[in-house]
Structure formats: structure tokens, C-alpha cells
Image (cartoon, helix red, strand yellow):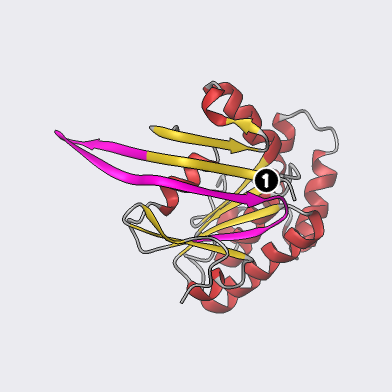
Amino acid sequence: MAKILNVSNLGKSYSSGSKKLSVLEDITFSIEKGDTFSIVGPSGSGKTTLLGLCAGLDRADTGSIELCGTDLGALSEDERALLRSREVGFVFQNFQLLPTLTALENVVVPLELQGDKKASQIGIQLLEKVGLANRLHHYPSQLSGGEQQRVAVARAFSNQPSILFADEPTGNLDAETGEKIIRLLFDLNMDTGTTLVIVTHDMELAEMTQHQMRLKGGKIVVAQNTPLL
């Protein structure tokens, strides 16, 4: 299988006053196209920072990241944004929906920015797929947390991404609703072949993915393909 993400000797640190705080150190792993992969670890272990680097939202200090066959380090800010718009989907813990737009409008924003004339049609189909056919014209404030996350999932799949990054996708949801969202993500992964990368502290969720990696203190302590004990 082709590798969709290759991370090699990745390091990232931030300045905190006069001190340098190391967030990630010597991270190396790869993910194959179509796989489901989880990154787990306690708060402060570097999970979200790693996700942002892999998606090209930030630059690493050391090492390299190859996403969809492209070296992110060789790209400008605009080129990375273009790659994300074509290849990447995101689902966040806090939904990140635009409050002044309806569910349908939130889903079609990425498509309209690309000038897709079928944006509305695609948006309706996606919202039907996530069980929100009767909520197309509701605003986020009129939707439950679970419904808002379903809108976010539909939006994430709107550009038919090669890879989807989900950062604590069930973090703000009750257990039952969270379970439905996860099932939805895995079903869409199966239907579309989109690679799914989930950052989570939920061990049960992590064990649902084909491969897992555990971080602690910015380092890998359990490598991929190794059962989490």
C-alpha cells in the first residue's frame, strides 16, 4: 500500500520567556492510504501539535513530513493551504462551525471557495448521509452538540479528502452521541477510502483503529501496529 503520510525525525519547540520548551522530539512514523490510525496520550503530550504539523498548519523545527506525496517543508504558506483544500479534511472537538451560516452553508463553504457549481447538491447529499436531511437550514445555535458535530463531519468530507484529521472529535459530546459520531467517521472512511487519523485520550476509541501510537512528553512510547496495553 502507498504511504499517505511519512513523518521522519520530527521535532518542535516553542519559546517560553527565556526558555525553550520542547513539545515534540524525534517523531517518526508512517500511515498507509485508507488506514485508520490513532494518536493517544495524556494532555500536554504533543498530540494536537503533531496533528497540526502533519496537516501543514504549522512548520516543524527539525525533520520532515511528506503528505500525499508532497514534502510540506518545501511549500510556501499558500501552497500548503492549497494542498489542504484539495487533500485534507478536519474535525475538531469544538465543531468550529460559523454561527451566522446554516448547516448547509457551513458544509458548502469549502466547495464554494473552490468554485464548485455543484456545491449545494453535494452539501445536501452529505447532510443526508449524516442523518441531517431535516436540518439543512438550521443554524448551529439551533442544533444539539451531536448535530453540530455531524455538520462538521459532513463539511470535513465535502472536498472528498484523501486524509481526515480528527482532534478529540467526541471530547464535547456525551458517550452515546460520541459513539454515533465515531461510527459515522468509520463508516465514511469505509465508503470513501479516506485515511482517518484520530487524536484522542479515549483508549476504547484508539483500539477501534487499525494502528495506534502513544505519545508521552513529546516522544513516542508505543509505536504503530503495537497493541496498547
The answer to whether residue 184 is magenta is no
Image coordinates for residue 2, horizontal then vertical, percent: 73, 46
* Residue of label 1: 3
Residue appearing at x 37%, y 53% in the figure? 219
Residue 144 in view, yes or no: no
- Pick the residue in front: 16 or 92: 16
Give the prevailing secondary structure in the magenta stretch: strand
> Residue 20: within the magenta?
yes
Instruction: Read off the magenta span.
Output: 12-39
Please state the horizontal and vertical placement of residue 103, each as a whole percent of the image.
67, 51
Which residue does the image show at 49% across and 60% down from the upper left? 223
Number of labels in the image equals: 1
Classify residue 43 as left or right of residue 156: left
The crowding category of the residue bearing disc 1, from other C-alpha atoms within 10 Å (few below 14, some 14 to 19, many at least 20), is some
Q: Is residue 124 visible?
A: yes
187, 45: nearer the viewer: 45
Tag 1: residue type? Lys
Asked whether 72 or 9 is in front, the reply is 9
Closer to the camera in the image, 28 or 151: 28
The answer to whether 213 appears left or right of 31 in the picture is left
Residue 35, x across and y down, in percent? 68, 57
- Up-down relation of residue 177 to residue 61 (above or below): below
Q: Residue at x 35, y 52 (%)?
A: 218
